[in-house]
Amino acid sequence: MAALPISPSSALEFDVVVVGAGIIGLTVARQFLLGSDLSVAVVDAAVPCAGATGAGQGYIWMAHKTPTSALWDLAMRSKRLWEMLADSIQQKGMDPLEILGWKKTGSLLIGRTSEEVAMLKDRVELLSKAGLRAEYLSSHDLLSKEPALEIGKEGGAAFIPDDCQISALWTVSFIEKENRDFTSKGRYAEFFHDPAISLIRGSRSGEVEAVQTSKNILYCKKAVVIAAGSWSGSLMQKLLSESNIALNVPVKPRKGHLLVVENFDSFTLNHGMMEVGYVDHQIAPSHPSTSSDLVANEQNLSISMTATTDAMGNLVLGSSRQFAGFNTEVEDSIINSIWTRAGEFFPALRELELSNLSDNKKVRVGLRPYMPDGKPIIGPVPGLPNLLIAAGHEGEGLSMALGTAEMVFDMVLGNITKVDSAPFAVTGRCYN
Ligand SMILES: Cc1cc2nc3c(=O)[nH]c(=O)nc-3n(C[C@H](O)[C@H](O)[C@H](O)COP(=O)(O)OP(=O)(O)OC[C@H]3O[C@@H](n4cnc5c(N)ncnc54)[C@H](O)[C@@H]3O)c2cc1C
């Protein structure tokens, strides 16, 4: 971090500079543009959707979240904001399905054993007490809702009728378009393929005064927001390397695969579905017996069934979790496992060979920004109050984006946040 005398360049001076154009960075920018008269620049090392956002399945779900957890209020607030956005699109005479891929499908959290069913019944009670519509469905009741699903007589599901889904790609396009409407007013600019590389601090105030990118210096009058997903840890290390601030942001990439089968016509799913094991993010093989099992174990590889039909009618099957560094190569063995796992729930898939679907098969891979304590970091860096971090949403970044953006906005403007921000603070979670 260089401490240089600043001579602001009006052409490249903004109130807020956002680093990272994933769903978090773009919605933070949107919030400032719509909610204030501040100007915003968004910087990305690549382009929007280059990170986890481009791979995301798009569930805006409460089914697998726990009312007593620190994430609950933020998730509830965020879901409400998504619903309000869908309503506002509708009120403008447009169809949120066509604009955001928005579907109020409801979600089914599925169990197949008596233990899982007991756990689902408890969850229904917990969610109902927290004010959500939630209902337990026996395997018999499930059959009428999802005829393609087979879970055995013992099984059942928690049904959350108000859960929704979006298309991450369509939603990002919409948000980008909304943001770009402010370009002609001189309030918005994008700097893509232009990574942030250092910070410039005022010699007297010590405050961050500009972000140095590979091609530009972007002066910021009010705040810099680091929303670089899985890259936020290494980026913060680089940005603070010449300062005396010892900050270790422990975000790390958690690779995920999704399998999309286009023009799938064997069956349609009416709801979003997830097996109950998805609630436990840490499943890994406990007794590795072969070398590939060993690698899987070291990477904490887990695969749990998620399934939905998206806005275009594609079958979307997920998903895997593993720690494999920043590697985003498609691993065929993982895709085969996702397919096999889905076949355990949908017998019609067992009749089909994945290899015969190659023309219709698309794979999405992304790096979820994982935080060891399961909560994103949202807040200012101690000692540098105009430098904020908004990262580490793991598998919940799409659903929690709007609540996160609102929180960052309120923090920068000195407003009281709508949701308690203390659980997400940098302090106490990011020091060596
Ligand atoms: C398979 C899969 C399924 C998922 N399903 C869901 C789901 O159903 N629901 C849900 O809520 N979430 C889901 N998620 C999680 C969600 O996608 C992420 O939590 C979210 O996209 C994270 O957004 P982000 O903006 O923090 O990060 P990213 O989207 O990763 O964006 C970070 C950006 O920072 C940029 N960047 C990096 N370094 C720099 C630099 N030096 N300078 C400038 N820019 C930089 C990158 O290029 C990137 O564009 C899923 C994720 C995966 C992988």
Image (cartoon, rainbow, N blue to C red):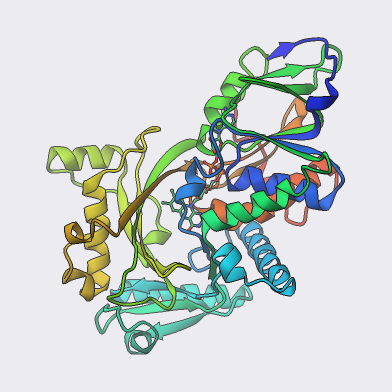
> Which quadrant of the view contains residue 3?
top right
> Which quadrant of the view contains residue 70?
bottom right
- The spot of residue 187 in percent (x, y) is 81, 40
- The spot of residue 429 in percent (x, y) is 60, 35
How many numbered discs sit on the rendered protein? 0
> In the image, is 368 to the left or to the right of 41?
left
> In the image, is 169 to the left or to the right of 413?
left
Q: Which residue is nearer to you in this view: 5 or 189?
A: 189
> In the image, is 22 to the left or to the right of 395?
right
Q: Which residue is nearer to you in this view: 152 or 2?
A: 2
Q: Which residue is nearer to you in this view: 360 or 52?
A: 360
> Which quadrant of the view contains residue 109?
bottom left
Inspect this view and state whether residue 46 appears: yes
In this view, the residue farthest toward the left is 290
- The spot of residue 141 in percent (x, y) is 38, 89
Above-or-below relation of 408 to 232: below
Q: Residue at x 27, y 65 (%)?
A: 342
Inspect this view and state whether residue 421 appears: no
Quadrant position of the N terminus in the picture: top right
Above-or-below relation of 337 to 202: below
- The spot of residue 360 in percent (x, y) is 29, 60
Quadrant position of the C terminus in the picture: top right
Above-or-below relation of 413 to 247: below
Q: Residue at x 74, y 52 (%)?
A: 406
